[in-house]
Image: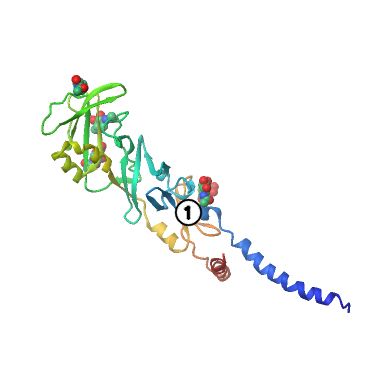
Amino acid sequence: MDPNSFPISSLVAPFFLLFALIRVPTTLCVDDPRYSNCSTMIRCGSIANIGYPFWGMNRASYCGQPGFELKCEDGVGKITMSQNTLRIFDVNPEQQILKVAREDFWDGYCPRELINTTINFNYFDYGPGLRNLTLFYGCFLPSTSVFIFLTNCTINGATMDVSYATRSVLVDPRPEVCHGSVIVPIYETAAQNLEVNPLTVNDALKGGFELQWNVKDDQCRNCRESDGVCGYNQTTNSFVCFCRDHLSETTCSPTQGTLARPLIFLSAFCRTFW
Ligand SMILES: *[C@@H]1O[C@H](CO)[C@@H](O)[C@H](O)[C@H]1NC(C)=O
Ligand SMILES: *[C@@H]1O[C@H](CO)[C@@H](O)[C@H](O)[C@H]1NC(C)=O
Ligand SMILES: *[C@@H]1O[C@H](CO)[C@@H](O)[C@H](O)[C@H]1NC(C)=O
Ligand SMILES: *[C@@H]1O[C@H](CO)[C@@H](O)[C@H](O)[C@H]1NC(C)=O
Ligand SMILES: *[C@@H]1O[C@H](CO)[C@@H](O)[C@H](O)[C@H]1NC(C)=O
């Protein structure tokens, strides 16, 4: 026997074995990029930890449902519904409540354009405890207990009188002369304040209103409980559960049969070491 070959091979072999042991699982442990992407939460100013069904910013479109795109502008989370941009104050995932205020009424009751509040009823409903504030622009309304005067607004270069009603008005008063009216939901408590003190109108508008989203949560809960991350296929309009290394329509529970045991072992191994 060649005296030189023995020590070298006996030294190298264990390294190969070690290398193989480490190398193989590392490649298998690389997470599905969609799993990683949707594992990140949205954070913007005062809102944080926002996940499914929301997406946008650091979360790709496959991480959420179509009506739930969030934007972050100057540290303020925003969502757009129809022509309204809504500022988000708070998101409560357990109760599925979004607390918002209209961006165009943030600086007062003289918006640049008169646009009604329109929410996406496919995904949202108004929360409880709200009342509709109606603002009338250029209607020459008599100041009564129903219509309360505010100071004039200048909208698109036109100066016009403004009044409001906190109770629903069945018909637009004198629509033939009115420049327009806008309905904005406010909290019931804000409406009551407003009936006593008209100067609180801007506070009422800034106070915003609540929306409840009506996405079924059980699919996502099942997926999360199986260590998956919730996602959505916006092409087929169906829920998807992203698992570390594959995609499932329901949960990430390992498949039954002979493959199950090594998969459970591998996934436990990956979770422990990577
Ligand atoms: C997720 O995907 C979005 C859109 O493709 C991208 O902008 C973002 O950087 C990704 N985030 C992570 C953490 O991969
Ligand atoms: C807002 O809705 C009310 C009630 O439907 C309507 O009378 C009014 O004209 C609408 N205003 C605008 C600007 O579309
Ligand atoms: C306010 O008006 C909208 C229609 O513009 C309606 O869908 C909503 O239910 C009303 N809210 C209340 C509290 O009456
Ligand atoms: C407010 O606007 C009305 C027109 O809608 C006008 O007749 C009135 O003079 C204005 N008042 C002031 C103080 O500008
Ligand atoms: C969505 O479904 C289409 C068609 O089945 C498929 O090609 C695409 O890869 C799916 N995307 C995701 C993110 O599941």
Q: Answer whether residue 46 is visible to the viewer in this image.
A: yes
Q: Answer whether residue 176 is visible to the viewer in this image.
A: no
Q: Is residue 243 left or right of residue 141?
A: right
Vertical order, 39 against 179 (above or below): below
Query: Which one is nearer the viewer's eye here, 119 or 15?
Result: 15
Q: Position of residue 55 (x, y in %)?
A: 44, 47
Q: Position of residue 79 (x, y in %)?
A: 38, 42
* Mark 1 lies within 8 Å of ligand 1 (Cβ measured): yes
Q: Is residue 270 left or right of residue 149?
A: right
Q: Position of residue 121 (x, y in %)?
A: 32, 43
Q: Residue at the location (31% across, 44% down)?
A: 100
Q: Is residue 227 left or right of residue 151?
A: right
Mark 1 packing: few (<14 Cα in 10 Å), some, or many (20+)? some
Query: Which one is nearer the viewer's eye here, 213 or 51?
Result: 51
Residue bearing mark 1: 40
Q: Position of residue 59 (x, y in %)?
A: 48, 49
| Scheme by which the image is coloured | rainbow
Split into 4 quadrants, where in the image is the N terminus? bottom right
Query: Which one is nearer the viewer's eye here, 188 or 238?
Result: 188
